[in-house]
Image: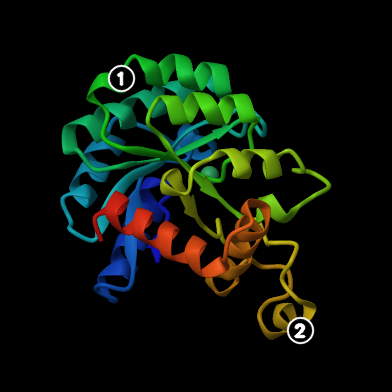
Amino acid sequence: MILTGTSVRNSEESAKMARQYPGVLYATAGIHPHDAKSFDAQSISKLRKLLELKHVVSVGECGLDFDRDFSPRNKQEECYKAQLELAIEVQKPLFLHERSAFSSFMNITKDYLPKLPKAVVHCFTGTLQEAKTYLDNGFYLGFTGAISDAKRFSHLKEVIQYVPLDRMMIETDAPFMLPKNVPNSLLKKYQERRCEPAFLPYVAGTIAQFKGITLAKVAEETTRNSKSFFEI
Ligand SMILES: [Zn+2]
């Protein structure tokens, strides 16, 4: 399991927690666009220090979020560029977040592309055309329980059918993005509406259904992708 860092403090906590469970937990180190307002002159050196640790496997999550705009857009861009440069320096894979910011995101990212390590656009909820652009630029796509939300994200069925299995990863985005197809009995056993790692098979199940393949095949391939991507 990979614990996502979303701010300097949260990345430090994630790294500390992961250290207690070697070979089971890993962490990322980065600043989420929502937290870009906390980005300062010391942020990058603190993230760099975390990324020296073997169990801190990825830079991010980082990127742009123009859906919520919890940080000013110019601050988000500054913070994102600094983390792209950090990923180039440390050569650890990038864990990217893009929400309602596709064109600005690609505009910034393309300047760094030739030197970038491998990258995954996590919790993908964009259009098929956006998915194609990401794939054409060599990115992986991460899918969450959002794919089973036929009301809000029905277009993702077509996206899942298009994206090859070898460029796909699955994730919880816990505590968010609870899959719609988790049975009520299981929800009661946990914390009702909170997404849990235990629900990941329901993300795999939706992909299997959309692609007309077995759940075992989805599990096997996406596990292999994640292990090789994060080198764990
Ligand atoms: Zn995210």
Residue 155 image position (x, y, % from top left):
73, 38
Q: Local crowd at mark 1 within 10 Å, few (<14), some, or many (≥20)?
A: some
Q: Is residue 15 above or below residue 142?
A: below
Instruction: Identify which residue is drawn at 18% across, 56% down.
Output: 53
157 displayed left or right of 65: right
Asked if the residue under mark 2 is in contact with the one under mark 1, i.e. CB atoms within 8 Å, the reply is no
- Where does label 1 land, which residue? 112
Image location of residue 144, percent across then percent down:
59, 53
Amino acid under disc 1: Tyr
- Residue sitting at x 53%, y 40%: 163
Q: Quadrant of the N terminus?
A: bottom left
Residue sitting nearer the eye, 94 or 228? 228
Q: CA distance from mark 1 to mark 2?
A: 47 Å
State the residue in front, 20 or 129: 129
Q: Residue at x 32, y 29 (%)?
A: 84
Q: Quadrant of the C terminus?
A: bottom left
**Number of numbered callouts drawn:** 2
Seen in the image, is 94 located left or right of residue 102? left
Residue receiving disc 2: 185
The residue depicted at 18 percent of the width and 58 percent of the height is 54
Toward which corner of the image does residue 158 lie, by quadrant?
A: top right
User: Mark 2: which amino acid?
Assistant: Ser
For this rendering, which residue is in front, 29 or 24? 24
In the image, residue 55 lies at what x, y percent?
A: 23, 61
